[in-house]
Image (spheres, rainbow, N blue to C red):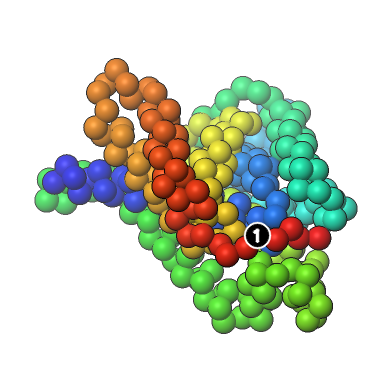
Amino acid sequence: MYAVQIAVDAISLGSLYALVALGIGLIFGIMRLINFAHGDFIALGAYALIVPSASATTTLFVGSWPWPLMVATVILFVMLVALVTERAAFRPMRHARPATLLIGSFAVSFFLQHVVLSVYSSRPKALSIAPGLSEPLIVGGIRILKLDLVVIAVTISLLIVLAVFLKRTSYGIWMRAAAEDFRMARVLGVRANTVIAIAFAISGLLAAIVSIFVVIKGGLLSYRMGVPLVLMGFVATVIGGMGSLVGAVIGGYTVGMVSVALQAVLPTGLRDGRDAFVFIAVILILLWRPGGIVQVAALKERV
């Protein structure tokens, strides 16, 4: 019974990491850009639940709105931020070297963090939305949080929708072609600006969904709350195979399952250092398969 509970926890955490890794992998697949600002998209989605009002003493609590309106507001806001970021920061650097793009992503990340600091200050903020999802379900002696089941169900649904989009729609086929060979795709008529903008929009959507789940689960907002998530998401993309969306998902679930398994088996005194053991496991996986679990035939620079 305990093993089943651990498995559900592992799949739930892996689902969050898979969504983060997928958002990073989408951008990397097309632009060869590791967007470390993705973690700040997640933080902005969380802070979008609290909108400062004209009065300095009150705020507009978006988290109290009806669920469909709240989710739609957060998603639209984060997608808009992602699109503005692409247009203002990354599009002018599109022909730059990969190292320049990487530095640019750090610059965007720090800029977004300081925007949050200037608006909300550095004090962490406590939020409580959908408290009912934090209640457990007892099934055959197994204690499972409702939130874990929702996270798993939503993640599976998003993965299915994204797979259908990439395989069945014109824009999805354009994105797959750009990921295979961006230069050739442009020669054949694929619109670079459109494809990259769609990739950033989808990345923003995924970040928004993750931010809502993180707020429900943790209930605490910090301007750097997205940094650990984007780090784990990046690790997941490396494990799964850089440039492979399937690999990003597999890597996310792998990292989540390893994290939960270590939390369960490590002695109490070593649990605080769980992440160190996670990265040791990552090193072992990469020693076994340096190219990741799903290896991409060729990684070509996008210009």
Instruction: Specify few, some or many for label 1: CA neighbours under 10 Å numbering under 14, 14-19, or 20 or more.
Output: few
- Is residue 253 left or right of 202 when viewed as pictured? left
Image spot of residue 139 (x, y percent): 16, 51
**Does residue 295 appear anywhere in the picture?**
yes
Question: Residue 272 appears in which quarter of the rendering?
Answer: top left
Q: Is residue 237 above or below residue 260?
A: below
**x, y percent for residue 301:** 74, 58
The residue beneath circle 1 is: 299
Please tell me whether residue 121 is drawn above or below residue 8 in the rendered image: above
Q: Nearer the viewer, residue 237 or 298?
A: 298
Outermost residue to the right: 92
Question: Which residue appears at 33% of the width and 39% of the height?
Answer: 260
In the rendered image, the quadrant that contains the C terminus is bottom right
Given the current orientation, which residue lies at the most extreme top position? 269
Residue depicted at 46% across the width and 45% down the height:
286
Q: Report the residue at 26% width, 21% height from top.
A: 268
The percent coordinates of residue 168 (x first, y second) are 57, 82
Q: Position of residue 279 (x, y in %)?
A: 45, 34
Please identify the quarter of the rendering in which residue 26 is found. Answer: bottom right
Tell me the amino acid under the disc marked 1: Leu
